[in-house]
Amino acid sequence: MALLSWLIIGLAVGFTSRRFFPGRPGGLIATLVLAVVGALVGGYIGVFFNYGTLGESQHGAQLLALLGALLMALLVKKLRI
C-alpha cells in the first residue's frame, strides 16, 4: 500500500510541477516519470531508515517520498531537462 501512495505522491508532484512551469522542455511524461522516481527513491530511503515498510504506509516514509519528488522536480528545473 505504501508503494502505491509513493506513486500517487510522485504523480501529484509531477502534475503540479508541470502546471507551475509549463514552458519547460521535456514534456509531461518525462516530468511525471522523474517525479515518480524521486518519490520512490525517497520512500525507499524511508524504508531503509525504518520509517515504514512497503506494505504499511507511515507518515515518515510518505514525507521522504514527497521530499524526494520535490527534490527531483527542482533538480530537473535547475538542469533544464
Image (cartoon, rainbow, N blue to C red):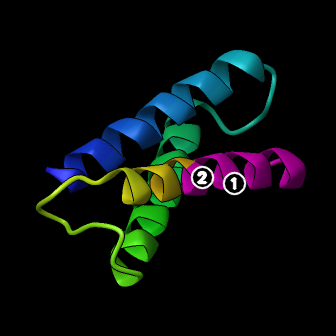
Picture quadrant where residue 75 is located: bottom right
Question: Callout 2 environment at 10 Å: few (<14), some (14 to 19), or many (20+)?
Answer: many
Pointer 2 with pointer 1, Cβ within 8 A: yes
Residue at horizontal 21 percent and vertical 69 percent from the top: 53
Q: Secondary structure at mark 2?
A: helix
Q: Residue furthest bottom?
A: 48
- Quarter-of-image position of residue 18: top right
- The mark found on residue 67 in the picture is 2
Foreground tag (2 vs 1): 2
Give the prevailing secondary structure in the magenta stretch.
helix
Percent x, y of residue 71 = 69, 54
Residue type highlighted by circle 1: Leu
At a point 68% along the width and 39% down the height, the residue shown is: 26
Q: Locate residue 33 relative to residue 25 in the image: left or right.
A: left
Amino acid on which the number 2 mark rests in the picture: Leu
Decide: is 35 above or below 19: below
Q: Which residue is mark 1?
A: 71
The foreground one among 42 and 76 is: 42
Asked if the stretch drawn in magenta spans residue 7, the answer is no
Label 2 vs label 1: CA separation?
A: 6 Å
**19 over 67 or under it: above or below:** above
What number of labels is visible? 2
Q: Which residues are magenta?
A: 67-81
Q: Residues within 10 Å of mark 1 (few under 14, many from 20)?
A: some
Is 72 colored magenta in this rendering? yes
Please state the horizontal and vertical placement of residue 9, each as a whole percent of the image: 41, 39
Query: In this image, 35 relative to 2: left or right?
Result: right
Query: Is 68 positioned to the left or the right of 57 in the image?
Result: right
Give the residue displayed 81% in from the left and 44% down from the top: 77
Label 1 residue SS? helix
Q: Which mark is residue 45?
A: none
The location of residue 51, given as percent across then percent down, is 36, 69
